[in-house]
Amino acid sequence: MLEAGTPAPDFTLKDQNNQEVRLSSYRGTSAVLLVFYPLAFSGTCGGEMAALEKALPAFASAGVEVLTVSVDSTYAHKIWLIRESWTMRMLADFWPHGGVAASYGVFNSSAGFADRGTFLIDRAGVIRWAECLGPGESRDTTVWLSALASLDGG
């Protein structure tokens, strides 16, 4: 897993609306919370995404764009978002399969999906805070909100 102080690898992925999202397009304008999760429609991931959806206004107030990433397709993301009435951006690390997760060191090659890696990236494109949990472990969005203090001076 990439550590704090490391430049965040740039990438371009498609979101649930099949629109390209390039990480470097946020440089100079907004910090990014990059949230990798294993699979759509799973219980633990669903609980995390629901909690994240509730926290979106707090991240927006802090000038942080939230991007979630899994190996699922754009179509699976679209259906999941519609079903749950969520508004976040979900990016498809579909092909090459898990390539972006691998560049951040959170791709679980034996399972074929990303572990629960979370990266807070400052406006300069540098990782300021990071964590990684295994597939069955649930993350806490309050920890991510607390990590916003690491952006001071970033």
Image: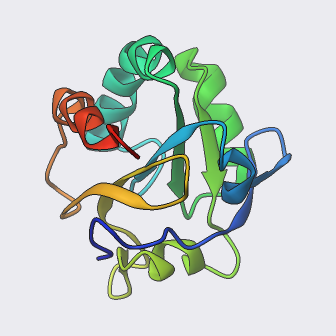
Residue at far bottom of view = 110
Closest to the observer: 32 or 75? 32
Q: Is residue 134 left or right of residue 8?
A: left
**Where is 65 relative to 111, above or below?**
above
Q: Within the image, what quadrant is residue 14 found in? A: bottom right
Closest to the observer: 22 or 73? 22
| Residue at the spot 73% in from the left edge and 50% down from the top edge | 74
Tell me the quadrant of the picture where the N terminus can be found.
bottom left
Closest to the observer: 28 or 14? 28
| Residue at the spot 66% in from the left edge and 22% down from the top edge | 82
**Where is 101 relative to 52, above or below?**
below
Closest to the observer: 111 or 99? 99
Image spot of residue 81 (x, y percent): 61, 28
Image spot of residue 126 (x, y percent): 45, 61
| Residue at the spot 30% in from the left edge and 34% down from the top edge | 48
Image spot of residue 140 (x, y percent): 17, 34
**Where is 16 relative to 106, above or below?**
above
| Residue at the spot 51% in from the left edge and 45% down from the top edge | 68
Image spot of residue 153 (x, y percent): 36, 42
Residue at far right of view = 19
